[in-house]
Amino acid sequence: VGAGARAAEFLGSVDSIGCPYDIAGVLSSAHKDSGEGMPGDVVEGHRIVGSVSDLPAVVKSVDADDIIVALDRFEYSSLLTADRKSGPVRYRVVPDDFAESLSAVLSTGSGVQPDDLPLIDITREQRGWWQSA
């Protein structure tokens, strides 16, 4: 989720290091003033397949395991609304210091797998807390 600069950095990095993440598509934040592309546009070689409001349908259609949140301006409310309908998937957030953290992971010299990426895991319990706040 995200089609701005943070998403472009994440997607470009994952592709350049050969991490075997099968990225099914990109969802924009759906805010007209976000500066993000629209469905059909491409971000770092990955097509924008919809907006965050389409998340439940996309998760089901591609049988997604992970939702990577790479929003330049994080909006919990729209994401949490979609989360209630998207089923049991893992949410991971691209942190501000992703590039620096990835460099540290790469310095180990071993291949990078999806679980090695320096992302912040958001548990179901944490999402429940945000939904009730």
Image (tube, rainbow, N blue to C red):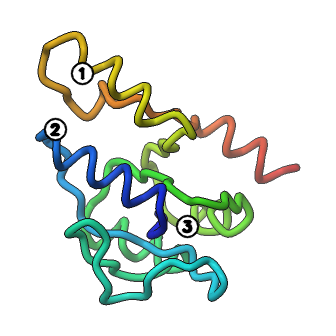
Residue 18 versus residue 91: which sits nearer the camera? 18
Of the residues shown, which amino acid type is indicated by label 2?
Ile
Image: 50 above or below 111: below
Of the residues shown, which amino acid type is indicated by label 1?
Leu
Residue that numbered label 3 is attached to: 85
Apparent side of residue 31 relative to residue 121 in the rendered image (left or right): right
Tell which circle, 3 or 2, labels the residue nearer the N-terminal end: 2
Pointers 1 and 2 in contact (C-beta within 8 Å): yes
> In whole angstroms, how far apart are the C-alphas of marks 3 and 2?
33 Å
Tell which circle, 1 or 2, labels the residue nearer the N-terminal end: 2
Mark drawn on residue 17: 2
Q: Position of residue 117 (x, y in %)?
A: 34, 31
Residue that numbered label 1 is attached to: 106
Apparent side of residue 108 relative to residue 39 in the rendered image (left or right): left
Q: Position of residue 18 (x, y in %)?
A: 11, 40
Q: Position of residue 63 (x, y in %)?
A: 27, 61
Image: 115 above or below 51: above
